[in-house]
Amino acid sequence: MVGNQYDENQSLGPVRKVFEMIRLALTMTICLTAQLPLANRHLSAQTLSAETVAAAAAPLIENKIVDEISIGFIQNEKRGTVHLGHTANGRSKADDNTLYEIASISKVFTSLLLADAVVRGEIRLEDAATLDNNADIEFPAYQGRSISWLDLSTHRSGLPRLPGNMKVTSIKNPYRRYDSKKAAAALAELKLTRPPGESQEYSNFAVSVLGYMVGQSAGKSYQELLRQRIAKPLGMMDCTVAMSEAQKKRLATPHVSVGSPTPDWTWADLPGAGGVRASMADMMRFAEAQLNPPKSKLGEAIELAWQQHTAADDSGPAMGLGWLIIDDETRWHNGQTGGSHSMLMVNREKQTAIVLLSNTAADIDQLAFELMSPNEKSIGKPPATRP
């Protein structure tokens, strides 16, 4: 696989080329996933259980799509988790306290931190995303139209998917040296080609800087703000960017493909687009809070993020703050790093949530759609999102 073809010191040029190489390297795995006939295709939405979920997920292990997968489900009063496969070299099995890279699901957390800042009166969604910050970040404008906080959260800022000055020395860990100062330099050189808000373009760059700026507004790092305003109130004990030594021992070893381990990704001070790690226990608590928000400021922020803020158009789906919206009730986000894949889907009308966490960079999203809406052949799922 590509991750084994380049050493740490070899220059690979612009990061877009790097990610194209990753995409090509993963094409066969992703295609196999898309074609894989999951078990229990006619699974009733009223009969989720550990047994039926395990049966539905088993082909992903049997057909060597993933090394290991953890599935969590909430359905009305029912709660359950299932762990299949192995986390590292076939020797250990995951449990509810195994940590995973949740990749671009981090964007949902970042936008929830934005919503929390709005509820606290620190930020107004419609205002220009400008404030004093340690990196001297300033967003470009287009003919007098500034980028708003809402634009950053809904991928309508006009910023590209990745910054133009992002160079990497290893595709195994591409974000580790890209920091806020480099982002400020990229933004200073960037010329927008259309007005912010006009159309959607998925941007890891935008949400990375959004996370940094929301932290700056509160005088805290992203890690501190995540812990204080989301993880601790919801009892998400392992939700973090930087891991302790004890947590590192519980991390599911990432895999480029089955049997091919790869290092986990690390981040400088811009982890908001994909740097969060969490356990299944954490993600179940987070999913529960989306279904039934607590009566608190955080609960108000969850409700604000849940609302539809932009409509679907030719450029992309409807969005809440960070959430992709399929219909009036279903919010979801997926994510993928060089060695992990994740998916979170929540439907309040059905009072159902599905969490998928895998230690392999393969598209497993079909399983979530099957479990959430088993009798629907397709509900318009866009491609996997990656930081």
Image (spheres, grey):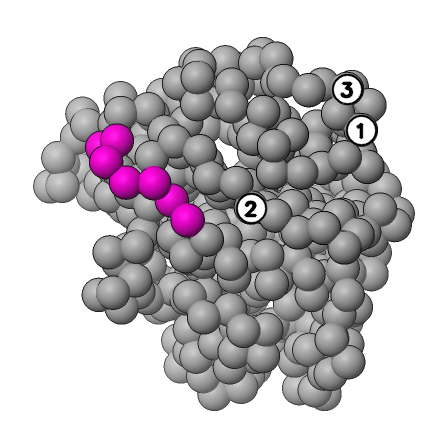
Query: Image quadrant of residue 143?
Result: bottom right
Location of residue 98 in the rendering, given as x and y in whole percent from the top left corner: 38, 52
Query: Does dot 1 land on a helix, a strand or a loop?
Result: loop
Check whether the beta carbons of the residues at disc 1 and disc 2 lie within 8 A of each other: no
Which residue corresponds to mark 1? 44
> Disc 3 versus disc 2: distance between alpha carbons?
21 Å
Q: How many marks?
A: 3
Relative to 265, 204 lies left or right: right
Which residue corresponds to mark 2? 81
**Residue 42 numbered mark, or none:** 3
The kind of residue tagged 2 is Thr
Q: Is residue 106 visible?
A: no
Q: Is residue 234 visible?
A: yes
Q: Which residue: 18% across, 25% down?
A: 5
The kind of residue tagged 1 is Ser
Q: Is residue 121 above or below residue 179?
A: below
The kind of residue tagged 3 is His
Q: Main secondary structure of the magenta part?
A: loop
Q: Which residues are magenta?
A: 89-95
Check whether the beta carbons of the residues at disc 3 and disc 2 lie within 8 A of each other: no
Query: Does dot 3 land on a helix, a strand or a loop?
Result: loop
Query: Does dot 2 land on a helix, a strand or a loop?
Result: strand
Location of residue 68 in the rendering, given as x and y in whole percent from the top left corner: 40, 33
